[in-house]
Image: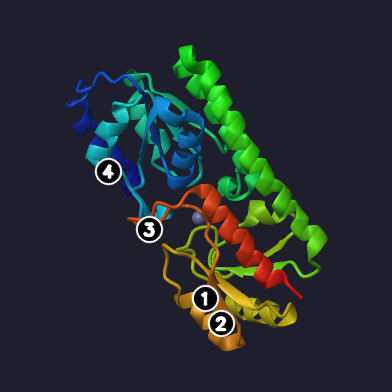
Amino acid sequence: MGKFLRIIITVFICIGFGNLTLAAEKLQVMASIYPMAEFCRGVGGDLVDVYQMVPNGIEPHDYEPSPKDLVKLGNMRVFVYNGGVEFWATPALQALQEKEIISVQTGEGIGEKDPHVWVSPRGAIQQVKKICEVFCQADSQNTAQYKLNTERYLSELSKLDEQYSNLAKQYRRRTFVTAHAAFGHLAKDYALQMVPVAGLSPEAEPTPQDLQKVLQLVKKYQVRYIFFETLTSPKLAELVAKETGAKTAVLDPLEGVAETDKVTYLELQKRNLEALKREFAE
Ligand SMILES: [Zn+2]
């Protein structure tokens, strides 16, 4: 409730600056989090200016927009978000109703219980298609180019989809241990087994019983690596690794990158694939 009230107050402040809309030739797009921004760049190419609400270096589950962020959102033509991670998106859009921002919740219908839709290439494919639809709606004279960009980006995602699908054919052991439960869609889509140390959000800390269960599973499946993330503390992963004799390694939930990192979503997906192969290898 506190968070919601704060947003409403900040939005009242920002409405005062509401008419600062700048004339811009390119389609002005706000993406909520890093993977949404990446998909927007893939679909939009040179035709769009893509901004990212949750800055690089910040874990998106912890983020709250500032009044300045909301003013910026108010100046956008399109807002692309995932849903489920951005608790602030609905109240922000309601407060900015008069701006007629075209918004799309790309995880709608896919990530109702677990928001981490973008982590699976199959989920990403659906999200990219939805982004293409809104860009074509917002900037219809460039429809042909958006469709061409989308086709190219989707062919990259399809390659990843195929490579992830091959894991089930290549490896018998397919259990992996992760810091927070961000890989549920990936596991479901590609017949893998995820054992998360924490919950759906990195702050959902495990109880001693949860931890005990993870330790047992690590031993049972002879897991080699306890995967941790780039934007959260590796402490829990290190603890589990120490208790079980496993090593630690990075498996990226692709939620955000370090402040100065220029790495693309597609590159990070390839790194994850290699990390999983090292875990699954006999
Ligand atoms: Zn997450």
Residue type, label 1: Ala
Residue 165, image x, y percentages:
75, 52
* Circle nearer the N terminus (3, 1): 1
Ligand 1 near label 3 (Cβ, under 8 Å)? no
Q: Read off the residue under disc 2.
A: 241
In three-dimensional space, the C-alpha distance between marks 4 and 2, rounded to whole angstroms, equals: 40 Å
Residue that badge 1 annotates: 237
Circles 4 and 3, Cβ within 8 Å, touching? The answer is: no
Q: Amino acid at mark 3?
A: Ala
The residue where tag 3 is placed is 258
The residue at the point 32 percent across, 32 percent down is 73
Residue nearest the observer in this picture, 52 or 199: 52
Q: For the residue marked with disc 4, what is the amino acid?
A: Arg
At horizontal 76% and vertical 76% (from top left) the residue drawn is 282
Is residue 254 rendered to the left or right of residue 272? left
Q: Which residue is mark 4?
A: 6
Type of amino acid at the residue the image marks with label 2: Ala
**Extreme residue in the top direction:** 141
